[in-house]
Image (spheres, rainbow, N blue to C red):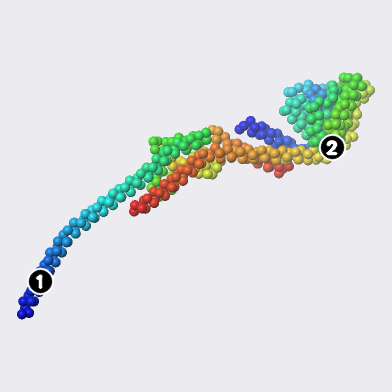
Amino acid sequence: MALPWLIGAAVVALGAAAVSAFSDDSDSGSGGNGDEERRRRERAEQERKARAHKEKLESMKEAFVQEGMQRANDLQQSLEGQIKVILLGNKPFKAILDNDEEYHNPVSPTYVEVYDLQFLPQGTQDYLVKLESLYDVELEPEEELMKVPVRLKEIDHKLAQLKALREKL
Amino acid sequence: MTAKDSMASADLDVLLKQASDILARKQGQDKPVIAVWGMMNAGKSYLLNMLTHHYNAEYFPTKDTRETAQLKQFEGESYIFLDTPGLDAHDADDQVAMDGAAKADVVLFVHQPKGELEKIELDFLKQLKESFGVYAEKNIVLVISKADAESLEKIEQIEQKVLEQCHLHLGFAPESFLISGTRFHKGIQQHKDGLVKASHLQELKQHIETLGIDVRAVREERIRHVQNTLLLEISAAEEALNDEKLQLEDNLYWNFARFNDAMLSLDLSMTLKKVEYMNERILGE
């Protein structure tokens, strides 16, 4: 009498297992398609973000150059009467934003050295060197400006003479 | 260079020359230097020719014209005589005359008796008095030339007036002599001692000799005075030059102020943009 019960139980168990197996197969098939879609979407999102980021960086670089160009005329005018500034080429601003180094691209010898502009205040000398490192320019001091070091030299000479005279007297 | 600068330079050159003259005098000749000073055509060269025994041939040209605006000297046995250009408020020539007086140990100030001392004569005498210091009263001698050009009474009136002016403006009345060149020359040529005596030239000569010129003391006094004056002028010149230098440097600063500001602004903007860019780049990694 126990056998039919056992058989019955086994059949039920097998049935349940079969149902379970069928059910697992069914779940597994629909879950694989969803992951792929999600990953695709994520990839697309990442690519979009990367593109947008790249575009932003490019636009920042462009804005940087744009500003450099816009300021060129102002700089040129700010030196009017002292130093003639000749901007060279269509895009004289040559600084690069994504350069890890300093912006400086020193030209040797600098115009400060070429024209012996060491009589100018140190800060102005530094800015002139920076100007020619940022821009393709030619600098030419005005005649009036170059009279200043001559007079300064004369004054120093006279002062030295007076000092010597004072010591002799 | 501005006109003011070039004037300052010219002044400085005069200053340097005066100083080098003084330094030269420190090691200069020991014979007393007697300079003759006065207005144009006062009779300076005439007097000098008499004092240096140039009776016939002129050693000192008596045509006191502008072309001869330089010092001429004659070295005698005991003295060095120095002729100076006539004063006439002509800056360059008057400066030569001042230089001549600066070298002198005794100054014979010659005034022709047309009237009292003119302002320019008084101004020069004041400067002369300053430079002689304590020796002024003794070593500045007044000579009224051409004493025979007017009556004795008038000449004496003029002399009196001139001495009063000296007393008023200089604080002392110098020894004065009424000299007649005409009488002296006649006396020499005609061997008439009376005329020579009446010219009063011998009295002047004797006075110079009795001055007992202490060359060293007089020079030291005058050099000390000039040194002090020069030191003050050197200080003033140094101050003017230092002021000019500061002004030039100040102008440079202001002439480049706009450029400096523009570069500072550009520099700050670029630094800011670089920081923003680097941050953005890091965010993307």
- Which is more toward the observer, A67 or B240? A67
Q: Is residue A28 above or below residue A123?
A: below
Question: Looking at the image, which residue sits at the far bottom?
Answer: A1
**Secondary structure of the residue carrying numbered label 1:** helix
Q: Is residue A111 visible?
A: yes
> Measuring 73% from the left and 38% from the top, which residue is drawn there?
B230
- Which is more toward the observer, B160 or B179? B160
Structural crowding at the residue carrying mark 2, measured as other residues with C-alpha within 10 Å and reported as few (<14), some (14–19) or many (≥20)? some
Q: Amino acid at mark 2?
A: Tyr
> Measuring 65% from the left and 41% from the top, which residue is drawn there?
A160
Picture coordinates of residue B116, whole percent (x, y) = 84, 24
Disc 2 chain ID: B
Q: Quadrant of residue B113?
A: top right
Instruction: Identify the residue position indicated by label 2 in the image.
Output: B135
Instruction: Identify the residue position indicated by label 1 in the image.
Output: A12
Q: Quadrant of residue A67?
A: top left
Apparent side of residue A21 relative to residue A43 in the rendered image (left or right): left
Apparent side of residue B55 relative to residue B85 in the rendered image (left or right): right
Q: Is residue A19 above or below residue A51?
A: below
